[in-house]
Amino acid sequence: MIAVIQRVQHASVTIDENIAGQINTGLLVLLGITHHDTTEDLEWLGKKIIGLRIFSDEEGKMNLDLKSVDGDILLVSQFTLHASTKKGNRPSFIDAAKPQVAIPLYEQMITFLQQQTGKTIQCGQFGADMKVALLNDGPVTIVIDSKNRI
């Protein structure tokens, strides 16, 4: 499971010209799920996302986590994070999980993050053509792969 995490001042996802989810201060999380991912990957990654100390404290140092700033999460599924570009110029998405595997894990991640934060998690729609808008704060962008823990 791969997450691209962006600290944002605001972010939204639009589907068919309708806003599906939006947040102010918080994290935009693009989530890529592979067919090898498990609930263990989900919980490990979810805890990392919530615990990241990437918000500025009074001294301007990245020292605060999401809860410390009362931030929100916008979670968007993105299978293209598992693109392989080793051969040629057309990416292969063979490592991305099929919907029957990915959708349940995506929904479990939403539930896990809600339980851990006590907040409603804003979301895109799995498999939809989405337009994501954001104001990256910093910019701060972090990539975490649950298969690369060491």
Image: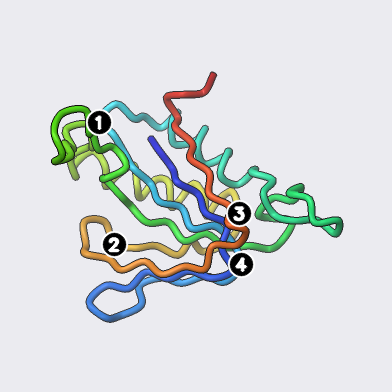
- Name which residue type carries label 1: His
What whole-number distance in Å separates the C-alpha atoms at marks 2 and 3?
21 Å
Q: Which of 75 and 55 is in front in this view?
A: 55
Query: In the displayed structure, does residue 67 sit left or right of residue 99?
Result: right
**Image point 85% across, 59% down: which residue?**
58
- Between disc 1 and disc 2, whose residue precedes? 1
As displayed, is residue 147 above or below residue 139? above
Foreground label between 4 and 3: 4
- Name which residue type carries label 4: Thr
What whole-number distance in Å separates the C-alpha atoms at marks 3 and 1?
27 Å
Foreground label between 1 and 4: 4
- Name which residue type carries label 3: Thr
Q: Give residue 16's position: percent from left, percent from top.
A: 22, 77
What whole-number distance in Å separates the C-alpha atoms at marks 1 and 4?
32 Å
Q: Is mark 3 on a helix, strand or loop?
A: helix
Label 3: which residue? 117
Q: Is mark 1 on a helix, strand or loop?
A: loop
Q: Residue 35 carries which label?
A: 1
Toward the front, the furthest residue is 88
Label 2: which residue? 125
Foreground label between 2 and 3: 2
- Between disc 2 and disc 4, whose residue precedes? 4
As displayed, is residue 58 above or below residue 95? below
- Name which residue type carries label 2: Gln
Kindly indicate whether the residue at mark 3 contacts the one at mark 4 (C-beta within 8 angstroms).
no
